[in-house]
Image (spheres, rainbow, N blue to C red):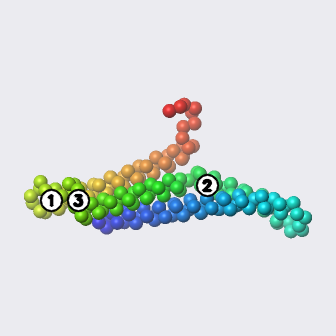
Amino acid sequence: MQYSQDLIDDYKRLRRNSRNIYYSSQFLTIVLSGLTPILVLLDKLDLSITWIKWLPVIFPAIASIVASGTTSFPFQENAIKANAAVESLEAEQEKFVLGVTPLYRCFDITDEILRQQQVIENYINQINEIHLKQVQESAKIQNSASDGQGDNSGNVS
C-alpha cells in the first residue's frame, strides 16, 4: 500500500508541477505579447531614457522563448498523463481495499494465507502495470521530442 501511495503522491506532484509550468508559461506568453504593441508605442515617444527603447525588442524575444519552450517540452501532456496515472492508481487501490473485483477475491483458493498472498501479488502486478505503462508512454514522448517532433521524411503514414 505504501508503494502505491508513494507512486500516487509522485504522480500528483508531477501533475501539479507540469500544470503550473504550462499555465504560467502560457500566461507569460500572453502578457508579454500583449505588452509588445504598447512598448512599440513607447518607442515612438521621444524619451531620453535609453533602456526603454530596448523593451520593444526584449519583451517579444522573451515571449518567443517562453512560447518555444512550452511547445518544445510536453508540460501539458505530462500533466494529463500524470492525472490518468493518479486516477488509475487510486482506482486500483480502492478496488484492492474493498475487494470488489474477482482479482482481489480469489475464492477458488481455500487456504486463507495463500489467498491473501495471491491478492497482494495481484495488487502489486496491477500497480506495476499501471506504472510501467506510464513510464513507457513518457519514454515515447521523450523519444519523439528528441527525434525532431516526428517523422520529417515526407512519407505519409
Tell me the crowding category of disc 2: few under 14, some 14 to 19, or many 20 or more residues within 10 angstroms, Cα based. some
Q: Amino acid at mark 2?
A: Gly
* Front tag of 3 and 1: 3
Q: Name the quadrant of the N terminus.
A: bottom left
The one of 115 and 84 positioned closer to us in this rendering: 84
Q: Say whether marks 3 and 1 touch (CB < 8 Å).
A: no
Residue at 58% x, 51% y is 72
Q: Tell me how far mark 3 sits from mark 2, CA to CA.
A: 44 Å
Q: Is residue 37 left or right of residue 144?
A: right
> Is residue 121 visible from the viewing direction of this image?
no
According to the picture, the residue beneath numbered tag 2 turns out to be: 69
According to the picture, the residue beneath numbered tag 1 turns out to be: 115
Circle on res. 133: none
According to the picture, the residue beneath numbered tag 3 turns out to be: 100
**Location of residue 17 in the rendering, given as x and y in whole percent from the top left corner:** 51, 64
Query: Which quadrant holds residue 108?
Result: bottom left
